[in-house]
Image (tube, rainbow, N blue to C red):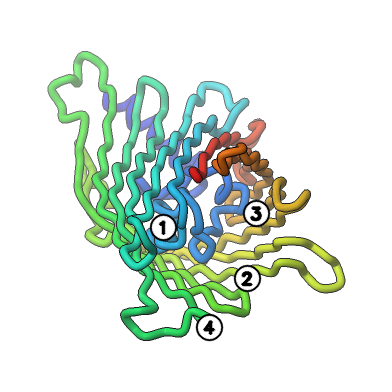
Amino acid sequence: MIKKILVISLLIITLFAGVDASFENTYWGARPLAMGGAFTAVANDANAPLYNIAGIANVVRQEFTFMSSKLFTGVEGVDIGSNYLAFVYPVFSQEYGAISFAWASMSATSVWREDIFNIGYGRQLNDVFNLDTNIINLTAGLNLKYLMQEANFDIEDRDLPSSKGAPTCDVGVLAQFANGVSLGLSSKYLTSPDVGYVSENIVYNTNVIGLAYFSEEIPFVKIPFFTIAMDVLLRNNETNIKFGLESYVIEGRLALRAGARDEAFSFGFGYEHEFQNGTKMIFDYALEIPTQVQETLGSHFVGLSFRFA
């Protein structure tokens, strides 16, 4: 029945602590989620398509990633999960940029799901603006998206529309300076599409400003390959701030991560193994603990990536 769908929708909204529309949760990518979702100014791997499409222009090797998750484990009656799959392909040389294909999905089993299909392109702009690569690396990108939302109604409501799709797009810019500072800008869902299959459900345009700093080693404390990042998310007159930390130890093979945002804090790690042919396999895990949901063991995210030689 419609009532059942509305109850599930209300439950999902409550669990996501104040999010008021579909497609506005970024529960994709174990690495960025372990950093609290603060990834707009980092965006240097196959997670970039859904955080800042400009970042794919800095991916110099073909990369594939897959992530699966279980959200809010331990909460009785809740079975929500998310999946993410992406492939980034640099086009011959950096001057031609890179293209990406990505799919992201979130669902409550047998009740509701939403899918995002993405085709993206990113390119370095230093040659366009005659910028010195020893000072700055400037990239930009465009992501074409198709959103699909579905609900499973009971028999008596089967005559109602149960799915709705809509196209939209993202744009992004990423500036990386030689001193380790990066600034990212991402504007998502530019057209604010309506994905409501029974009543209006607007996916609001979301603008994110990201700031990050990377150092091969922090002086005095000797923390290697250290990144600190912050995202400021602006959507529908609301502001959400996210923070993230990352450090690579054991000669860069083991990543340690932590993060926080308004509704949760997170931890995670990644481990990289290089095969003899130069291909790298990367395993990532993230645990997010919501601050406003009781009796949960947290949300668990597992990712596997391949960076091909």
Residue matched to label 3: 259
Residue matched to label 2: 213
Q: CA distance from mark 1 to mark 3?
A: 23 Å
Of all residues, the one furthest to the top in this rendering is 155
Label located before the other in sequence (1 or 3): 1
Q: Which mark is nearer the camera, 1 or 3?
A: 1
Residue matched to label 1: 56
Residue matched to label 4: 135
Establish if 70 lies above or below 292.
Answer: above
Q: Quadrant of residue 162?
A: top left
Q: Residues within 10 Å of mark 3 (few under 14, many from 20)?
A: many
Mark number displayed over residue 155: none
Left or right for 284, reference 161: right
Q: Secondary structure at mark 2?
A: strand
- What amino acid type should be assigned to the residue bearing mark 4? Ile
Q: Secondary structure at mark 1?
A: helix
Residues at discs 1 and 3 in contact (Cβ within 8 Å): no
- What amino acid type should be assigned to the residue bearing mark 3? Gly
Q: Residues within 10 Å of mark 1 (few under 14, many from 20)?
A: many
Label located before the other in sequence (2 or 4): 4
